[in-house]
Image (cartoon, rainbow, N blue to C red):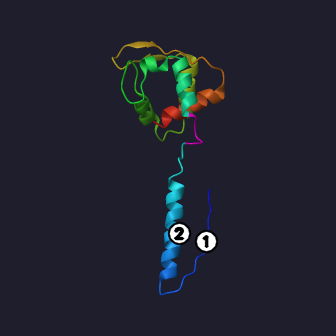
Amino acid sequence: MIIWRTSISARGPGLGTRVRGAVQLAAVLAALSIPLSASAFDEDAARALGKRNDCFKCHSVDKTKKGPSYKKIAAKYKGKADADAKLTEHLKTSPKVKLEDGTEEEHKAIDTKDAKEIKNLIEWILAQ
């Protein structure tokens, strides 16, 4: 959290209030322009892990392929407290999954034991 206080004084009726308001507005706009996801996940690392594991063979960010798009997955888990746990389990265990065409097959388990890599991939998927 960034707390920034400033005091600017100027002469003239109401001018000080306008200057303070402009500075406060500028601070808010600057804070909003900081990408919130910048520290949440590493997109390049997530995409690299997905590529190494052939995830993009069945999934796309925004198009349905053999499996659902990452946007569709993110929408499914939006606001759910157990999203991380469910997706972690899904990626690590090779469960049977129902595909977009209605058929079922075993989902390939992700080929990494690094929990940070898996968490990063999940955070990236959920951010779509």
* Label pair 2/1, CB-CB below 8 angstroms: yes
In the rendered structure, does residue 87 fall within the stretch colored magenta? no
Q: Secondary structure at mark 1?
A: loop
Please tell me which residue is depicted at 46% across the width and 39% down the height of the picture.
Answer: 78
Q: Which residue bears the numbered disc 2? A: 23
Question: Along the line of sight, which residue is nearer the eye, 104 or 38?
Answer: 38
Q: Is residue 83 visible?
A: no
Q: Is residue 50 visible?
A: yes
Question: Looking at numbered disc 1 in the image, what kind of residue is underneath it?
Answer: Thr
Q: Which mark is residue 83?
A: none
- Magenta stretch, residue numbers: 38-42
> Nearer the N terminus, badge 2 or badge 1?
1
Dot 2 surroundings within 10 Å: few (below 14), some, or many (20 or more)?
some
Please tell me which residue is depicted at 54% across the width and 50% down the height of the picture.
Answer: 34
Identify the main secondary structure in magenta: loop
Q: Which residue bears the numbered disc 1? A: 6
Question: Along the line of sight, which residue is nearer the eye, 10 or 57?
Answer: 10
Question: Looking at numbered disc 2 in the image, what kind of residue is underneath it?
Answer: Val
Task: Name the side, left or right, on which 70 lies relative to 52.
Answer: left
28 vs 52: above or below: below
Q: Secondary structure at mark 2?
A: helix
- Specify the quadrant of the image occupied by residue 72: top left
Q: Position of residue 27 (x, y in %)?
A: 54, 63
Q: Residue furthest left?
A: 101
